[in-house]
Image: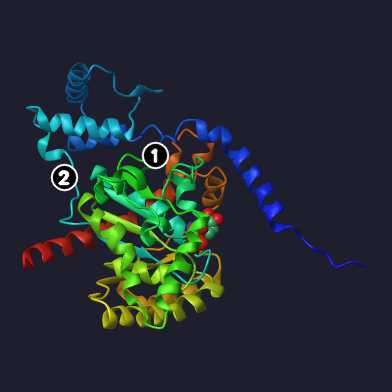
Amino acid sequence: MTVETVDLDALSDVALKVLNSNKEDAEFGEAKEFRKYDRSKELMEQLLDGVLSKKACTTVKNHIKKIEESIGTALGEKGTNNHVYFTLEEIHLIYDALLGMNTKYHANIPQKFTMSEAYVWLLTNLKGGTGKTTASVYLAIALALYSFQRPRILVVDTDPQGQVHEYFDGRVINQDTTPTLGQVVSGFAVAPKGMDHLEWLKTSVVRKSHVANIDYIPALPSDTRLERFLNKKYFSPETEYDCLKLLNEKVIAPLKSSYDIILIDSPPHNNLSVQSGIYCADGIIIPAATKPMDSEPTLAYVKELAHKVNILKEELDYPGVKAVRALPGMFNERRVSAKTVKRRYSKVFQEMLLPEIIEREGYLNASQQFRTMFDYSTNDDAGTPQRSHIINDWNSVAEQLLRYMERYDDLKVGEE
Ligand SMILES: Nc1ncnc2c1ncn2[C@@H]1O[C@H](COP(=O)(O)OP(=O)(O)O)[C@@H](O)[C@H]1O
Ligand SMILES: [Mg+2]
C-alpha cells in the first residue's frame, strides 16, 4: 500500500478554474439591481400626510409629471391596479425635486438622517454562523430604506470569506486591478502618483452596492494575509501596537465625513483584524444566535472584548466603546431552549439587548440566490409570505439604532 499524496497546487488551479467559469457570465453581465420599489403608496401617504383623496393624489402625480418633463425621462413603471413602481433612486429624485419646487409638501418630505461624522459599528462575535454577515447586510439595507431618511451607509467587510460582496454585487472581482482591503491596510496598495489617498479610496476601493445609498468595501480570500502582516508587527520583539490603528488610519477615518453610518463585518475570530476593527468602533453589535451552542461562546466572548478594549485604551489613544448592543438572532419561539437562551442574554445585556430577529427559512432561500429578502418585491413568489415579517424585524432594530445615533450626535455636537 502506498501513502496517499496530493498536489495542492494543481488542485487549487482546478478550483480557481471552476470558480471563474461559474462566474464568467456574471462578470460581464449587469450589476445586480435593487427591486423596483413597491412602496409608492407609502410615498403618497407620506407626502399627503395620510389623507389620500383622489384629488390630492392627482396633484402629486401632476408634480411628478412636471419633474419628468424637466429631466426628460419618465419615472416609475406601471404595475397592476394603477400601481406605479419606482426605483429607490427615483423616489429620492422625486423628493429632492419637490424640495426645489414651490409645493406644500416640504414639511412632509422626510428629513435626511445626517450625522456630523459617521458612527462606526463593529459587528463581532467569536462564534461563526451567528448571523454577523446577515446582520451587516440586512441592517445596512433596513437603515438605508428606513422612512426614506437616506442615511449614507458604508459596509466594510473584514472577513476574508468575502460574503458582503456576494450579497451586494456578486460579480467576479479582478484581483489584478482591484486593491483589496488587506492590501490597502497593510500599505501594499497605495494611491497612484498624483492622486490623493481619499480620492483613491473613493474611486478604486469603495464600490457601489445595488442599493442607492449603500457603498461597501469587499474582502477577498487573499485578505487572510492581512492577519499575517499584523501578527508580524504585533508579535515582533518590540510589539508595534500601532499596527492596530492601520485599518482606521488608512480606511475608516478618511471616509467618516462621506457617510453617516459605517458597519464593519468581522470574521469569527478573536484576532488582530478584529481588534483593529474595535479600534475604529464607536459601538459594538454582538449578533447572538438564540441557540444553546451559541450562548456559551457568545457570553464568554464579552470578557475577551473587554480585554481587547483595555489593551487599546492602555497602549493606544482609543477612548473606549460608547455603546454595546446584543442582537438576539435566529429566534424560534417553539423551542424552549431559545427562550432560555434569550433570557440569559437579557439578564446580561438588559437594555442593551436589541429586538429579536426570528428564525425564518426565507434567509436561506434568499441567500441561495445571493440575495437578501429586501431584494424581492411582494409580487415575487420567493418574496412571500415571509418577506414583510423579515423586513419588520430589521426595521425594529434599525429604528432603535437610528434613534440612539441621533441622540448621540445631538449630545456630541452640543458638547463641541
Ligand atoms: N434569522 C435567521 N433565520 C434563519 N436563518 C438565518 C437567520 N439569520 C441568519 N441565518 C442563516 O444563518 C447562516 C449563518 O449566518 P451568517 O450571517 O453568515 O453568520 P456569520 O457571518 O456570523 O458567520 C446563513 O446561512 C444565514 O442565511
Ligand atoms: Mg460572516
Q: Residue reaching furthest right?
A: 1
Question: Which residue lies under the disc numbered 2?
Answer: 111
Q: Is residue 63 above or below residue 371?
A: above
User: Looking at the rendering, in which quadrant would you find the N terminus?
Assistant: bottom right
Disc 1 packing (10 Å; few <14; some 14–19; many ≥20): some
The one of 157 and 412 positioned closer to us in this rendering: 157
Q: Earlier in the sequence, mark 2 or mark 1?
A: 2
The one of 52 and 241 positioned closer to us in this rendering: 241
In this picture, residue 343 sits left or right of residue 117: right
At label 2, the amino acid type is Gln
Disc number lying in front (2 or 1):
1
Q: Residue at x 41, y 69 (%)?
A: 274
At label 1, the amino acid type is His
What is the number of the mark on residue 210?
A: 1
Image position, residue 296 (x, y; %): 51, 79
Image position, residue 77 (x, y; %): 36, 22
